[in-house]
Amino acid sequence: EAAGGARAAEDVDKATRRCEELEEMLAERETQNRQLREEREAAAKELAALAQSNSALEAEVERQSEVAAELQRKLAQRGEEASEEAGAVVSDLQSSLKTLQEKAAADAAAAEQNRQDLEGRLAEAQATIEKLTKEVRQ
């Protein structure tokens, strides 16, 4: 009986240590999960900011397009002398518009790449969470 009691006490000690180890692992996993959630939230905010910036650039491009179109209409109504001066202005605006369109296209491409990167990171984070959850359950 004494040997059985000692063995039972040893088994209880082992089980207690294992529970403590599992509790530590669970706390670590919860910390990792919290960090991953925070990273995911930060990535979502960054993506939203990029989308907002892209929308603002698109609105500016639209506004510049309207300005250029209006200037072209006015140019048609003026005399030949004024057309040379207006042509230079339109050319500058078109150049600015082209630059803005190129920037908007580049920003859109960067936003799309960032979105894809963030979705990839999100998928990795979710896979890690699932893996860690599965490990804790085992």
Image (spheres, rainbow, N blue to C red):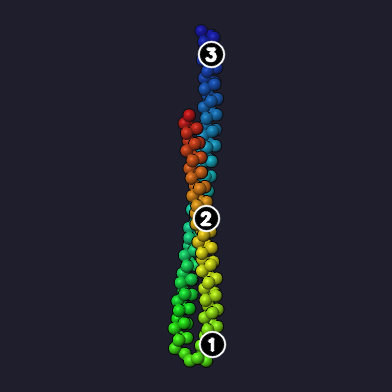
Instruction: Please determine whether, in this image, residue 129 is positioned above or below residue 58.
Output: above
How far apart, in angstroms, are the residues tagged by discs 3 and 1?
103 Å
How far apart, in angstroms, are the residues tagged by discs 2 and 3?
61 Å
Q: Amino acid at mark 1?
A: Glu
What residue appears at the point 51 percent right and 15 percent down from the top-left corner?
A: 8
- In the picture as drawn, the residue positioned furthest to the top comes out as 1
x, y percent for residue 55: 47, 65
Q: Earlier in the sequence, mark 2 or mark 1?
A: 1
Q: Mark 3 highlights which residue? A: 7
What residue appears at the point 55 percent right and 25 percent down from the top-left corner?
A: 17
The one nearer the camera, 12 or 78, is 78
Q: Amino acid at mark 3?
A: Arg
Q: Would you call the spot at circle 2 few (<14 residues within 10 Å), some (14-19), or many (20 or more)?
A: few
Q: Amino acid at mark 2?
A: Gln
x, y percent for residue 94: 52, 76
Q: Secondary structure at mark 1?
A: helix
Q: Mark 2 highlights which residue? A: 113
Instruction: Please determine whether, in this image, residue 18 is positioned above or below residue 93.
Output: above
Q: Would you call the spot at circle 3 few (<14 residues within 10 Å), some (14-19), or many (20 or more)?
A: few
Q: Mark on residue 101?
A: none
Residue 53 seen in the current view: no
The one nearer the camera, 117 or 4, is 117
x, y percent for residue 138: 48, 29
The one nearer the camera, 24 or 135, is 135
Q: Earlier in the sequence, mark 2 or mark 3?
A: 3
Q: Mark 1 highlights which residue? A: 84
Q: Secondary structure at mark 2?
A: helix
What residue appears at the point 53 percent right and 77 percent down from the top-left corner?
A: 93
